[in-house]
């Protein structure tokens, strides 16, 4: 059934557009045309994030930061093995998935470490990417939203690891 949801939605939208006497193809093309402006606006931010993440991982700064923050994460109940995931998740989704894959293959899918990593992966967002997309065309201050999002990500990691320990 789920394979038919998108085609059904598209057919319903087309039928509704024809019923309302809207040129559906023209409206679609106009929407596609306006999306180029959005892509042009957010592209530099996305490239900057990708370059920063690649430099962060290649420079070894991530390893040093994990070693420095491990005592704090231990106090918060976050295992050392998932510290890199907690640090990189706000920056990159695909990099986080590769770290998650490494954790699961190293510790097994049913281990406490892997459950914590999966919980962290599912309970947080790539804050900087999402912020770049949503705030690219906005004149609003971005820093309060980023700070609140990062604090929410850390709290979700702490609570997720606590629940994984209890369950």
Image: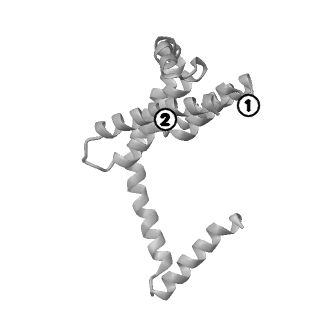
Identity of the residue drawn at 38% across and 48% down: 134
Q: Nearer the viewer, residue 154 or 37?
A: 154
Distance CA(mark 2)–CA(mark 1) = 20 Å
Mark 2–mark 1 CB contact (< 8 Å): no
- Residue lying at the far front in this picture: please name it: 166
Task: Identify the mark at residue 62; answer none if there is no mark.
Answer: none
Identity of the residue drawn at 49% across and 27% down: 53
Image vertical order of residue 62 relative to residue 116, above or below: above
Dividing the image into 4 quarters, which one contains the N terminus?
A: bottom right
Q: Is residue 65 visible?
A: no
Q: Which residue is mark 2?
A: 156
Q: Which residue is mark 1?
A: 110
Identity of the residue drawn at 73% across and 31% down: 110
Q: Nearer the viewer, residue 77 or 105?
A: 77
Q: Position of residue 160 (x, y in %)?
A: 55, 34
Colour scheme in use: one colour
Q: Is residue 49 visible?
A: yes
The answer to whether 89 appears left or right of 150 in the picture is right
Label 1 sits on a secondary structure element that is loop
Label 2 sits on a secondary structure element that is helix
């Amino acid at each position: 059934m789920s394979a038919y949801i998108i085609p059904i939605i598209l057919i319903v939208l087309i039928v509704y557009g024809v019923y309302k006497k809207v040129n559906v193809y023209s409206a679609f093309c106009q929407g596609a045309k306006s999306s180029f402006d959005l892509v042009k606006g957010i592209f530099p931010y996305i490239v900057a994030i990708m370059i920063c993440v690649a430099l962060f991982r290649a420079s070894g700064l991530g390893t040093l930061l994990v070693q420095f923050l491990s005592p704090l994460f231990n106090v918060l109940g976050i295992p050392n093995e998932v510290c890199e995931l907690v640090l990189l998740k706000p920056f990159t989704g695909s990099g986080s998935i590769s770290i998650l894959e490494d954790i699961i293959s190293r510790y097994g899918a049913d281990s406490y470490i892997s459950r914590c990593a999966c919980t962290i992966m599912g309970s947080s967002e790539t804050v900087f990417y999402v912020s770049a997309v949503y705030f690219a065309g906005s004149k609003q201050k971005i820093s309060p939203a980023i700070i609140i999002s990062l604090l929410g990500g850390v709290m979700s990691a702490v609570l997720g690891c606590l629940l994984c320990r209890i369950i």
